[in-house]
Amino acid sequence: QVQLVESGGGLVQTGGSLRLSCAASGRDFSGYAMGWFRQAPGKEREFVAASSGSGSNIGYADSVKGRFSISRENANDTVFLVHLQMNKLKPEDTASYFCAAGWTPRKGFMQTRSVNFWGQGTQVTVSS
């Protein structure tokens, strides 16, 4: 059974930091691109960051470049981790953040239709 489980969301003030983590299990995710999307109330789900299976191709949405950093590690042969370090948070970063596994239509980029597996989401709220 495939599972992607996010953790690390919460409430933070403007300018603060949070680190999101996603634990993927149930298959070998080493060859999958993994990334993060977010969705604010009333808005479409949008791409945030992605990393190729090897970690050699990484990309970010323009809105988070220079503030967010994605990384991944293979905890063991059965659990695959992807992290999103979020610094200098802004109120407009407030959203539910979703871990995703799939493929990249171009280097360092994922789109919702290229996602095979989703996590359940974790809420990030940035207060002004």
Image (cartoon, rainbow, N blue to C red):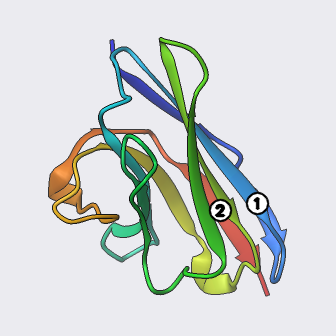
Q: Quadrant of the C terminus?
A: bottom right
> In terms of image quadrants, where is residue 53?
top left
Q: Visible in this render: residue 37? A: no
**Cα distance between the residues tagged 1 and 2:** 8 Å
Q: Position of residue 72 (x, y in %)?
A: 55, 42
What residue is drawn where x is 80% and y is 67%?
17
Q: Are marks 1 and 2 in contact (CB under 8 Å)?
A: yes
Q: Which residue is mark 2?
A: 124
- Tally of marks: 2
Q: Nearer the viewer, residue 15 or 51?
A: 51
Up/down of 66 relative to 57, above or below: below
User: In this figure, which residue is indicated by the disc labeled 1?
Assistant: 18
The 10 Å Cα crowd at callout 1, few under 14, some 14 to 19, many 20 or more, is: some
Between 97 and 106, the one nearer to me in the picture: 106
- Rendered view: 124 above or below 2: below
Q: Which badge, 1 or 2, comes first in the chain's sequence?
A: 1
Q: In this rendering, would 49 be left or right of 66? A: left
- 15 vs 77: above or below: below
Residue at position x 52%, y 59% in the image: 96
Identify the secondary structure beneath mark 1: strand
What's the residue type where badge 1 is placed? Leu
